[in-house]
Image (cartoon, rainbow, N blue to C red):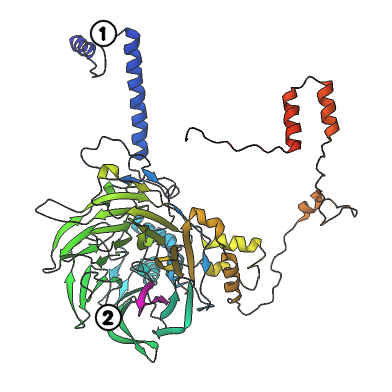
Amino acid sequence: MEENKQDIIRKTKEKTIAADSLDNNAPVHQIIEFLQSKHKKNKVFNYYSQLVKQRNTSWFSHYLYPGQTLTAFGNDWDGGLPSKFFETFAHRSFLPKMITTKVRNTNVTDPVTDIMSKKIDWNQPWQYQYRKLISLKARKQKVYEWLNEEVLHCPKDLVEVAEHWEKDPDIYFDASYNWYYAGNGNMQMISIGGDDYLVHSDMNCLYLSLFNRNNLTIEYEYEAKYKFPEKMLILETVVLQNIIAVRTKYKVVILKFTERNDLLELTKIKEMDSKLPLTGISFDEYHKNILYITSLDYKLTIVNIDRMKGRSKQLKGRFETLADNWNTVTGSERMYFTHVTKNSLTLYDKRTNSAFERWKWLRDITDNSDCDFITSAKYCSNKPLMYIGTNHHMLLMDMRYSKIENQKVKPLQRWTHGMQSVPTYLSMCNYEHDKELICMSSQWCEDMCVVSNHNDIVTRDSNFRKTMTPYRPPSIFTTLHRAQQKMQCCDLHIPIRDRLSVAVTGLTLFECNEGYCILMQNSLGDISAHVLCPKTMLTFIDDDATEKLNEWSNLCIQSKQIFEVSYIKNIKKVLKNLKRVPDTYPIGENTFKRQKEYEIDEKDIYDLYEKTDLDMGLLDIWIKSNDKQIIPETIDQSIE
């Protein structure tokens, strides 16, 4: 045993430290300083690796971790970053303003959060029911017994649990956001005969309204409307040319708008039903006459708009349950379409409908390894790139695939959006001369971020890519706060705060005048506008957001109710600390009067120079300034 200990000690003594930059002939104190500096660097590296490594977040610290803005580099990257690697957004947003002049859907609840509140109410007594199941299991006896084919003998607690389970408002929904409304949203902008139109839906009505992008006004006089049955809530609306497709929970309705007597009319062409809830619809951006429809069980229906015929295809993918199994299909390439699920991106050949490529490494490139899911996706126009949104990040994916060149789907950039709700909508447009502008929003009215990116990100050298820090525009509640400071929007009979806080169901980004505009629509049909302009122009443009909000609030007048005292708070302690203001105190008057400016007496200045030893050069300057001598212009004689 002692010999083994000696061997171990001898081996530790023979251990050497190898370093390329260590000078063996240097003095001892320099070698010690070098080793100490190396040790400090290792400590810094260990601390940095702990910050950027993946984490398992808890419920309370879910949104407290700031993620890193990253980009993909080549294999020959030396670790350095180019100058100004982190760019700032060159534009700023005015306060959002309401542009709708017609208020619809009054005295109704928010349909987006309605199912969520019902689910919460149903889950509250479930803990009590769960304890009943645990107590039944702890008895270790046969819980139920079939007396015959129709009669089952079981404890009363089990009957109550089964009865509660049958009252589930939606067996397919159990999420923190309403993924039924995810996808393309309920607001799109199209051009008809050179004029801009908004295709927007709220509740069970579809509207086609004339829109002026310069003045940000909606012309309701030239509005076309199509109304569905009352219980058929519109969840997603897509449009291509003169065809509009609307998705409800179990149906897809295809409509067509035509012009008659200088007015637009909406007519229904086709209607399709589904046994399971539908999750997404989209038009193929390359083959314009193809419509994709997906359901919870990864079943894809490809509809040819010209023939009005469809064929079904069971897409590949594993899922344990149909609950919250959101997925959608989007197409932008000539040879394949993309199936987007919560954890993967799968490419399918359009000719054979067979999968040939799958990317499922989302958890390897995110900071939080246990909560990031794909919740939105959108292709770039005329480019093999796709932006996807997750719980915490927005990713730019390179969707190019080539077996010959060994190209596969891979991420290029990552941003941390900082939103406190799941992003459900993506919109983009051209930005400046060589960039694109991406806007991402959730269903919460205060959650939105804007990011700009270069158009040539694929061909640009990976070692010289720059990334922009996401910009968070102000919310509509900031406008409400400013308006209330001006004593506007203060009528107690018009409680607009509850209406402003309803969920967002549509997002559109476009260019307007010399800037950019973001339109957001809530589930009740109200549309607000964020105007983005250069920072230098903010002081030269009047912001009328508070006036617009006040005008809109006057349209929300409901039946006035008589206010009654419902509660009286005891303020006895406060009254003891109050002091009476004297009657002579001038309330309302300005007690801070401006003092008169001190007038300088020149005689005092001359006396000061005679009695003290001040520099006389200062007195000469005083005399010259009083004489108002003209200083001759200086001429550069070196030019001659």
Residue 67 in view in this figure:
no
Q: Earlier in the sequence, mark 2 or mark 1?
A: 1
Closest to the observer: 209 or 24? 209
Q: Position of residue 324 (x, y in %)?
A: 32, 64
Q: Position of residue 235 (x, y in %)?
A: 37, 73
Q: In which quadrant will I find the N terminus?
A: top left
Region of the chain picked out in magenta, as a range: 187-204
Q: Secondary structure at mark 2?
A: strand
Decide: marks 2, 1 in contact (CB < 8 A)? no
- Kind of residue sitting beneath label 1: Asn
Mark 2 and mark 1: Cα distance apart in space: 84 Å
Question: Is 481 on the left-hand or right-hand side of 318?
Answer: right
Q: Give the image quarter of residue 241.
A: bottom left
Q: Position of residue 489 (x, y in %)?
A: 63, 68
Quick check: 182 above or below 589? below
Which numbered disc covers residue 9?
none
Closest to the observer: 360 or 225? 225
Magenta stretch containing residue 486, yes or no? no
Majority secondary structure of magenta residues = strand
Quick check: 626 above or below 490? above
Instruction: Name the residue that disc number 2 marks.
Output: 273
Instruction: Name the residue that disc number 1 marks.
Output: 25
Q: Position of residue 344 (x, y in %)?
A: 24, 57
